[in-house]
Image: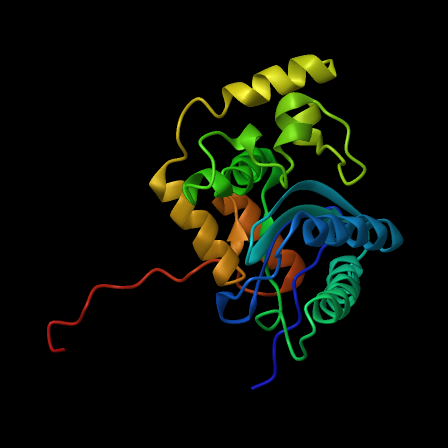
């Protein structure tokens, strides 16, 4: 069965995950993380994709991005993946694949879910018990969003810049969003949308994207079981 083309609408944000094949290690050192970040910056600029949030874990990466073109994300991820695999295989004297097939992605409702998605991404190391607080993990966007530090990779989304009138005010308000835990229902919604390439958003957003693309991006509700079953 042929794969459906990816949903990629210019100006609509997407949450991306790419995992190592069989959940194997993709980053073995800080040099590896730095190399990936370098090429992510290079190819995001080349293909006009704004990066709002990221986390590089040992065996997978999360990105929250907004493309300017319909094929920008695919071109960025293809170029980045190939470049990094060549580097990784050369560095560790190995051959073969590194990534688990195609990256997964879902479109994100910026008005209602973008900052929630950013928190989900930047809290990954905390949920994995690698650190106690998100600012303790070096390879994420929390330093940019939560501390207001400069990063070549970083382009703040409008949903973030509207938090305040200055870098300091925005970072302070953003940090306050981390005082509570993400609800389990929200976490499940994010994972479900991502793994099934659905839309993360309210019903109005899902309907709007479905009308634009002609594709169903929300799960059908199951009807009641027949008494004859």
Extreme left residue here?
A: 227
The quadrant of the rendering that contains the C terminus is bottom left
Residue visible at 61% across and 32% down in the picture: 142
Q: Position of residue 159 (x, y in %)?
A: 65, 30
Viewer-closest of 165 and 229: 165
Q: Is residue 48 visible?
A: no
Viewer-closest of 208 and 52: 52
Q: Position of residue 200 (x, y in %)?
A: 52, 48
Using residue 139 as the reference point, say whether residue 73 is left or right of it: right
Q: Is residue 184 visible?
A: yes
Q: Position of residue 51 (x, y in %)?
A: 73, 43
> What colour scheme governs how the chains and residues are painted in the rendered image of this protein?
rainbow
Extreme bottom residue here?
A: 1
Locate residue 150: give its quadrant: top right
The quadrant of the rendering that contains the N terminus is bottom right
Viewer-closest of 124 and 14: 124
Residue visible at 75% across and 67% down in the picture: 78
Viewer-closest of 83 and 89: 89
Residue visible at 34% across and 60% down in the picture: 221
């Amino acid at each position: 069965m042929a794969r459906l083309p990816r949903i990629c609408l210019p100006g609509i944000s997407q949450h991306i995950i790419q995992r190592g094949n069989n959940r194997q290690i993709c980053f073995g050192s800080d040099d590896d993380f730095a190399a990936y970040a370098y090429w992510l910056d290079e190819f995001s600029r080349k293909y006009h994709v704004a990066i709002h949030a990221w986390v590089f874990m040992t065996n997978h990466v999360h990105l929250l991005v907004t493309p300017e073109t319909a094929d920008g994300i695919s071109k960025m991820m293809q170029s980045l993946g190939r470049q990094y695999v060549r580097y990784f295989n050369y560095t560790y004297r190995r051959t073969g694949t590194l990534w688990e097939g195609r990256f997964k992605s879902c479109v994100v409702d910026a008005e209602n879910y973008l900052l929630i998605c950013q928190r989900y991404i930047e809290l990954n190391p905390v949920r994995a018990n690698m650190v106690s607080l998100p600012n303790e993990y070096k390879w994420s966007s929390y330093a940019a969003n939560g501390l207001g530090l400069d990063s070549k990779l970083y382009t703040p989304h409008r949903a973030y810049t509207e938090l305040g009138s200055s870098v300091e005010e925005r970072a302070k308000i953003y940090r306050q969003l981390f005082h509570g835990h993400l609800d389990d229902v929200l976490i499940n919604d994010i994972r479900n949308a991502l793994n099934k390439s659905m839309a993360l958003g309210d019903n109005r957003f899902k309907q709007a994207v479905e009308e634009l693309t002609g594709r169903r991006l929300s799960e059908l509700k199951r009807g009641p079981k027949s008494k004859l079953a």
